[in-house]
């Protein structure tokens, strides 16, 4: 019996137009024709997102993720937890983003050598080896224009010669010998409201998910503790591996030696017992008459329960029914666009002024002969509210131990719309 | 930057390779030797690269390699460059070398002979002092799939598996899998290596070796027994990918080793088992026997639980499936929240998680019912996500929530995504059959949908109604009538066919309407779809049999139409039906049964979840996701009826220095009742038993040390004898020094555990309970954390400096007890607002081997900020002091904790120094208690006795004291002694003798203390070369042991 090779066998990157623009094999080479099965699925799917993440083929399994309009297609030969592969592929994307600023086809092609070096370090024989950004950056330095120039002239390389200290230490996420002249620690508390609002304006479901993203630039081996005024709000949490779980369980305090740079410290879910404040309301009147080729379209947005904060960066989008030919609307503020091909209406509102509520009014024309659409479109809303965590979560204090200097500390709050939908 | 599109443009510039200014940019514009490219140009270009590779300039070579990697990435063939590339395998430039490795791994299989040229380079690199180079050499060597080098690979793997660097050992574990897939005949040898690596205590290796185990010998469960507890305990500290693999393996393991914790299921199976019981009585006995979970089973559940909070979705899923397959039913609910949390993640993650929830929700609605709203569909969800959510909502439907769900479904039915709307109608049908209360409501709703504008919706409704009606046709003749009325407006053929079938099947319920429908069909027959035609023929036949008077002519007309239809299917069917129903001389016996054949009662279709049988696969696996067994899927076995031998998991060696002693000296049952948490008790008992079982308890460090001695063919003698080992160490060669490094590395995972364990044990020890509750203040916790940090730093230091004194690192076990009391260094009144307190951390000092480590807490109680707090350079008493870095500013009411080290030179003479602020200077002094000048060490009892016998005469001092009654328990003796002096507890086989060992911080002089209880007296004996210290210690022990109180 030939051994079944586990884990990730090969990786193909496929762009939006269905071309393979990069391939990497960790074991024997798998012909790229294996992707034909993927292309078949791609053709069947009406939308790019509708490609099933796991596609079986006669000899392999294809597990793919779609990010930044690139499909990352991993070839698997035998049983493996699919989430293992999916999570890893997302980690690859995150790493590329971290290294090149964007994860686009152009960026990957421009940095193909670094990409290859990274993939080589991230997987050994298809099993993840180093996925921690701090470790990778010691092995392979991220490209900068300056370094590229210097390297070409001096002949020095982007590749580290020593095993990153993190690999062996008990704090693998942090490199040693970190030094800064300005010691800073910034924390962003970002909450997202996921909601479905029904026709009449009442909330069908609403929940708050939050994250604390940190940017920590501290010298040495600082040991931080972060405590909340109201930790009971946090119903379910997941941590960066640096957080000491026992301490959280016992005292509800986040105690950790932070990684260097940007990282997500915590993501949380606010307990569903708490009522969720919905910061915006939508008044809508969308109607199509039978037999007429015109329909009425009216939207008005207004703030509610915003704790006195301004609602900014409001963006309304809606997928209009297929029968709609065009829209003739006039916004009281901002700009709107309607794509007659995809039937996507989007209205960039900007800031909501409570005194003068933004509205979008006008008519939509239907294809002649098309029957009245039987469903009104759902409206997706995006917005931002600065300096507010809608759940009421508040950081109490941040302390540092283990180092002698005084760091500069900052905490920022923000509320955003997550998947915020209004059914009409 | 130049992209792919620029290729054709830059094509001409190819020949000019003016040492590319921007290498990264340049290499992206390598021509893709596109289909349009001429062969000659292609050939020429590779010649180019060959020339560059053969040039003497490193930069040109590197440039060439980068281009070649670009070719490989695009899937272009670059194999003809092999000879030119392979020459550079020994390059000094590490980036060039790495790129050559990339190339080699890609093409070695095709160019086996040439690949062999590179082997010697790797063999040499395997001996390189740099662990990264050793590891990457092994990685490449094992990735070259050339069968001829199998013996070399085997040898290298064996060697690397004993490497000092855990990173190299990890690479070795990966190489095992590679070699196995190259040559499965090596299995037996590889299993030996796996067995060895499974014993490895490094968290870095654990995941990889378990992976190799799963690949090579997943059936060798016996290899896991001895490592089971270690793996459970290491799990939290293993890197996340390793966690997933280990959890999956342990799930399988647990299912073979423990008995089922699912009590209810036993009751479910009652019927089938009934026969096995001879009498009712016996059965009751069997059932009433309480289920006690194996402590190891509990250990696994407890240690995986925190991982539900992992940021890695694969880990969360792995733990969830572990709980699903192993946990008692009532504990299952803890995974719900975490799984629901994952639904916020990427689309692909949602997909897998929803699939698993769908399977779970069939069996346990209750788990997800409170989170029903999380499964509401959004218009932006991908279709496969929508369908899965629908599936789950349907599974969750019950009498209580059905109205909410149906209301939600009404929105979905109107969705623009018609495939989804159709799926919703199917779901409504399932709800209707599962919950009889709403069958009528659902039916009515579906009937309403029949007048929907959208054909797919109508068609799907008809199909679902057909299925529903089949279950209870008699009550619903009005619906059938209604459908007959709608028939003219329905154009979807499947729906028309369904209605016709219904008419025929239940023509007795609608005797008047059915012939009329047939009449209409006769008119339009020729223009209908095939499927409608078939059903028309069917209807005609059924009516002919039941109501031939009215329909005889119609039927014959339709049969005639069918006879000349274009489709042979319909012609066949017509011929068949005619023979069957119209009696004539040719038709045989069959026509007698025509009625029974056509009008046979048909079983109603069962509407059930597509996920019904998915639980035959282990959750979270690929096989589960696809609902078909994938290659390499490992079956999860059923629980054994009787648990196999539990003792196989007992490890002979005690894990931690401090823990077993406390566990063992625990007074007894009376104490345990105090705590309600039965789980913890179980664990404690287990620990206790494991330490008792082990005949010769010794510490982790000494054990691993002796291992390494075996490796180096040194004497096999145990190393714990102080002077002996010291002498030995002095003669150690450099090699030996290195070889002991893994021991240092091995303890990397210990600190957290030791401290946590110690904390836990202290808390459990009733004596301190009150005290801890009162002073479980930040201070105590902070001190623990600080010591943890010290250890981190301490370990990091070790990696940086190989010259670290081996003696200290090997012997300084962690303290059994760290007092949390601080002493005052400077009062705020004397310090003009600055107050200082110090305490001994009892940790090895990171600033120097001979220093005692101290922790200083400085607080500012004045109302002005204090600036530049530091220790003045001049020390009045001449001790060597490591000062803390000056504190630039201390705000009012703020306090800061710093650490410092003082070399007291093994005397209790106070260290005097000046604590300075910007304005003032304060003289302070630290007077150490004699017990703080020690560091605990661990050794076996035998070694203790041996060492003790060497330190007699002058070196022995002893005293007899009368113990207060409350002090005679072994626990209290231990506690008293370790609180007075920083000593390690030596496991003792005699009940009434307690032994402790330590060494002085500065000179490393051995201090052995034994307390022999002879009720009511006790003899304290101290053996050490430092007699002054001995007498001081003796005095302190006397006071401590004769005094009552905590």
Image: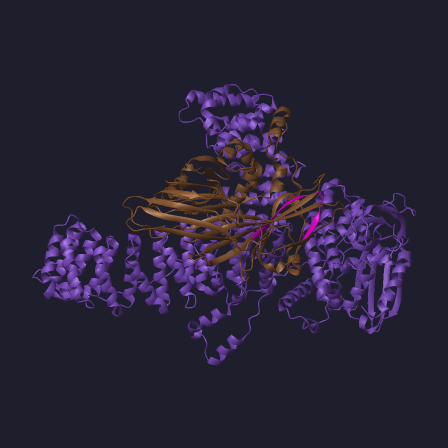
Quadrant in the picture for residue B275: bottom left
Q: Colour of chain A?
A: brown
Q: Position of residue B399 (x, y in %)?
A: 41, 68
Q: Is residue B401 above or below residue B288?
A: above
Magenta-colored stretch includes residue B183: no
In the foreground, B591 or B484: B484
In this view of the protein, can residue B73 be seen by the observer? Answer: yes
Q: Which residues are magenta?
A: A210-226
> Quick one: quadrant of the C terminus of chain B?
bottom right
Q: Tell me: B657 left or right of A155.
A: right
Q: Position of residue B728 (x, y in %)?
A: 79, 47
Colour mode? Answer: by chain
Residue displayed at 74% across by 56% down: B782
The outermost residue toward the front is: A355
In this view of the protein, can residue B255 be seen by the observer? Answer: no
Q: Is residue A345 above or below residue B835?
A: above
Q: Tell me: B251 left or right of B452.
A: right
Q: Colour of chain B?
A: purple
Residue displayed at 54% across by 35% down: A116
In the foreground, B259 or B591: B591
Quadrant in the picture for residue B601: bottom left
The outermost residue toward the left is: B585
Q: Position of residue A330 (x, y in %)?
A: 42, 43
């Amino acid at each position: 019996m030939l051994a079944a090779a586990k884990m990730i066998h090969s990786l193909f990157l496929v762009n939006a137009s269905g071309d393979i623009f990069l391939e990497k094999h960790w074991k024997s080479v798998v012909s790229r024709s294996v992707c034909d099965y993927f292309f078949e699925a791609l053709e069947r799917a009406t939308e790019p997102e509708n490609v099933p993440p796991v596609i079986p083929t006669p000899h392999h399994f294809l597990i793919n993720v779609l990010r930044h309009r690139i499909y990352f297609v991993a070839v698997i030969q035998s049983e493996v937890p699919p989430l293992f592969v999916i999570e890893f592929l997302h980690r690859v994307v995150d790493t590329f983003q971290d290294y090149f600023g964007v994860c686009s086809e152009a960026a990957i092609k421009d940095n193909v050598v670094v990409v290859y070096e990274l993939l080589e370090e991230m997987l050994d024989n298809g099993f993840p080896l180093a996925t921690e950004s701090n470790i990778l950056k010691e092995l392979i330095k991220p490209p900068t224009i300056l370094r590229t120039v210097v390297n070409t002239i001096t002949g020095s390389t982007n590749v580290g010669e020593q095993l990153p200290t993190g690999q062996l230490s008990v704090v693998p996420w942090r490199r040693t010998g970190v030094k800064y002249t300005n010691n800073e620690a910034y924390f962003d508390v970002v909450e997202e409201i996921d909601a479905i609002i029904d026709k009449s304006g009442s909330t069908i479901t609403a929940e708050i998910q939050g994250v604390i993203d940190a940017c920590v630039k501290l010298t040495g081996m600082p040991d931080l503790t972060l405590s909340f005024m109201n930790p009971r709000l946090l119903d379910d949490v997941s941590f960066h591996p640096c957080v000491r779980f026992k301490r959280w369980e016992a005292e509800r305090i986040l105690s950790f030696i932070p990684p260097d740079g940007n990282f997500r410290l915590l993501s949380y879910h606010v307990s569903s017992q708490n009522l969720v404040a919905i910061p915006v309301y939508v008044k809508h009147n969308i109607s199509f008459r039978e037999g007429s080729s015109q329909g009425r379209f009216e939207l008005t947005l207004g703030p509610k329960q915003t704790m006195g904060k301004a609602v900014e960066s409001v963006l309304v989008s809606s997928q209009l029914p297929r029968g709609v030919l065009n829209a003739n609307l006039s916004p009281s503020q901002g700009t709107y666009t309607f794509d007659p091909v995809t039937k996507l209406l989007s209205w960039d509102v900007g800031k909501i002024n409570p005194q003068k509520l933004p509205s979008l009014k006008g008519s939509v024309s239907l294809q002649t002969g098309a029957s009245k659409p039987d469903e009104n479109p759902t409206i997706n809303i995006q917005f931002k509210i600065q300096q507010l965590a809608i759940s009421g979560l508040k950081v109490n204090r941040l302390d540092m131990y283990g180092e002698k200097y005084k760091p500069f500390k900052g905490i920022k709050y923000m509320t955003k719309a997550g998947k915020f939908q209004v059914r009409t | 930057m130049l992209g792919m599109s620029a290729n054709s443009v830059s094509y001409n510039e190819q020949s000019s390779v003016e040492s590319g200014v921007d290498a990264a940019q340049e290499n992206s514009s390598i021509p893709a030797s596109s289909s349009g490219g001429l062969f000659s140009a292609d050939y020429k270009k590779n010649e180019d690269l060959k020339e560059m590779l053969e040039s003497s300039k490193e930069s040109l070579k590197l440039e060439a390699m980068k281009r070649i990697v670009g070719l490989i990435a695009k899937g272009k063939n670059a194999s003809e460059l092999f000879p030119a590339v392979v020459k550079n395998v020994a390059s000094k430039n590490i980036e060039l070398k790495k790129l050559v490795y990339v190339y080699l791994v890609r093409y070695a299989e095709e160019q086996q002979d040439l690949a062999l040229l590179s082997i010697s380079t790797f063999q040499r690199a395997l001996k390189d002092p740099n662990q990264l180079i050793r590891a990457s050499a092994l990685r490449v060597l094992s990735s070259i799939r050339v069968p001829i080098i199998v013996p070399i690979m085997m040898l290298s793997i064996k060697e690397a598996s004993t490497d000092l660097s855990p990173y190299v050992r990890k690479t070795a574990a990966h190489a095992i899998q590679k070699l196995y897939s190259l040559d499965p005949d090596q299995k037996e040898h590889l299993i030996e290596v796996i067995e060895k690596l499974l014993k490895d205590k490094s968290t870095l290796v654990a995941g990889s070796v378990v992976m190799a185990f799963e690949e090579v010998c997943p059936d060798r469960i016996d290899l896991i027994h001895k490592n089971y507890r270690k793996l459970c305990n290491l799990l939290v500290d293993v890197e996340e990918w390793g966690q997933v693999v280990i959890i999956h393996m342990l799930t399988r393991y647990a299912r073979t080793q423990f008995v089922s914790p699912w009590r209810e299921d036993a009751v479910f199976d009652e019927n089938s088992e009934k026969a096995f019981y001879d009498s009712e009585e016996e059965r009751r006995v069997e059932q009433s026997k309480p289920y006690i979970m194996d402590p190891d089973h509990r250990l696994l559940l407890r240690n995986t639980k925190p991982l539900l909070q992992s940021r890695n979705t694969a880990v969360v899923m792995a733990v969830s499936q572990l709980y699903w397959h192993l946990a008692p039913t009532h504990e299952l609910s803890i995974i719900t929240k975490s799984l629901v949390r994952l639904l916020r993640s990427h689309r692909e993650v949602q997909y897998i998680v929803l699939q698993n929830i769908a399977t779970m929700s069939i069996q346990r609605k209750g788990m997800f019912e409170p989170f029903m709203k999380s499964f509401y569909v959004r218009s932006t969800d991908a279709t496969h996500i929508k369908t899965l959510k629908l599936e789950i909502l349907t599974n969750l439907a019950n009498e209580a929530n059905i109205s909410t769900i149906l209301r939600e479904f009404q929105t979905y039915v109107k969705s623009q995504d018609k495939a989804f709307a159709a799926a919703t109608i199917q779901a409504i049908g399932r709800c209707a059959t599962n919950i009889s209360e709403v069958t009528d409501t659902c039916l009515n709703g579906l009937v309403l949908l029949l007048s929907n504008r959208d054909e797919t919706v109508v068609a799907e409704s008809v199909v679902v109604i057909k299925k529903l009606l089949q279950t209870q046709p008699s009550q619903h003749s009005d619906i059938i009538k209604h459908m007959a009325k709608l028939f003219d407006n329905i154009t979807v053929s499947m729906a028309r066919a369904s209605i016709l079938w219904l008419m025929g099947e239940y023509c007795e319920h609608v005797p008047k309407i059915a012939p009329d429908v047939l009449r209409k069909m006769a008119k339009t027959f020729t223009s209908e779809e095939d499927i409608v035609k078939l059903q028309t023929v069917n209807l005609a036949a059924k009516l002919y049999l039941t109501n031939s008077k009215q329909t005889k002519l119609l039927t014959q007309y339709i049969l005639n139409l069918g006879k000349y239809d274009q489709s042979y299917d319909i012609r066949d069917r017509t011929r068949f039906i005619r023979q069957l129903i119209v009696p004539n001389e040719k038709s045989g016996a069959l026509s007698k049964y025509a009625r029974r054949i056509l009008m046979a009662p048909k079983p109603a279709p069962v509407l059930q979840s597509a996920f019904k049988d998915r639980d035959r696969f282990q959750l979270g696996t690929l096989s589960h996701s696809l609902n078909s067994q994938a290659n390499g899927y490992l079956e999860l076995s059923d629980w054994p009826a009787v648990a196999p031998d539990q003792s196989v998991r007992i490890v002979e060696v005690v894990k931690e220095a401090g823990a077993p002693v406390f566990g063992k000296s625990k007074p007894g049952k009376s104490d345990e009742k105090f705590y309600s948490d039965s789980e913890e008790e179980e664990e404690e008992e287990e620990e206790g038993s494991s330490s008792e079982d082990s005949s010769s308890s010794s510490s982790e460090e000494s054990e691993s040390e002796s291992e390494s001695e075996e490796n180096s063919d040194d004497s096999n003698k145990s190393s714990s004898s102080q002077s002996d080992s010291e002498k030995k160490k002095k003669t150690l060669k450099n090699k030996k020094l290195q070889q002991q490094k893994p021991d240092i590395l091995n303890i990397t995972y210990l600190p957290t555990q030791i401290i946590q364990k110690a904390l836990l044990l202290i808390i459990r020890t009733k004596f301190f309970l009150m005290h801890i509750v009162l002073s479980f203040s930040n201070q105590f916790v902070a001190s623990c954390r600080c010591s943890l940090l010290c250890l981190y730093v301490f370990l990091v230091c070790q990696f940086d400096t190989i010259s670290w004194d081996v003696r200290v690192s090997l012997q300084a076990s962690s303290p059994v007890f760290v007092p949390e009391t601080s002493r005052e260094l400077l009062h705020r009144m004397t310090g003009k607002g600055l107050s200082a307190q110090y305490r001994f951390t009892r940790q090895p000092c990171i600033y120097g081997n001979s220093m005692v480590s101290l922790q200083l807490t400085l607080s500012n109680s004045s109302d002005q900020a204090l600036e530049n707090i530091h220790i003045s350079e001049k020390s009045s008493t001449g001790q060597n002091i490591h000062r803390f870095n000056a504190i630039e500013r201390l705000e009012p009411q703020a306090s800061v904790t710093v650490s410092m080290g003082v070399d007291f030179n093994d005397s209790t003479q106070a260290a005097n120094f000046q604590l300075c602020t910007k304005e003032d200077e304060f003289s302070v002094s630290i007077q150490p208690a004699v017990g703080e000048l020690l560091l605990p060490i661990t050794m076996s009892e035998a070694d203790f006795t041996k060492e003790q016998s060497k330190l007699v005469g002058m070196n022995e001092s002893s005293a007899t004291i009368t113990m207060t009654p409350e002090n005679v328990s072994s626990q209290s003796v231990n506690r008293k002694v370790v609180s007075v002096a920083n000593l390690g507890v030596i496991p003792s086989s005699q009940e009434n003798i307690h032994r402790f060992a330590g060494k002085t911080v500065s000179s490393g002089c051995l201090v052995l203390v034994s307390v022999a209880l002879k009720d009511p007296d006790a003899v304290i004996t101290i053996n050490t070369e430092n007699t002054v210290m001995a007498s001081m210690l003796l005095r302190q022990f006397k006071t401590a042991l004769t005094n009552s109180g905590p």
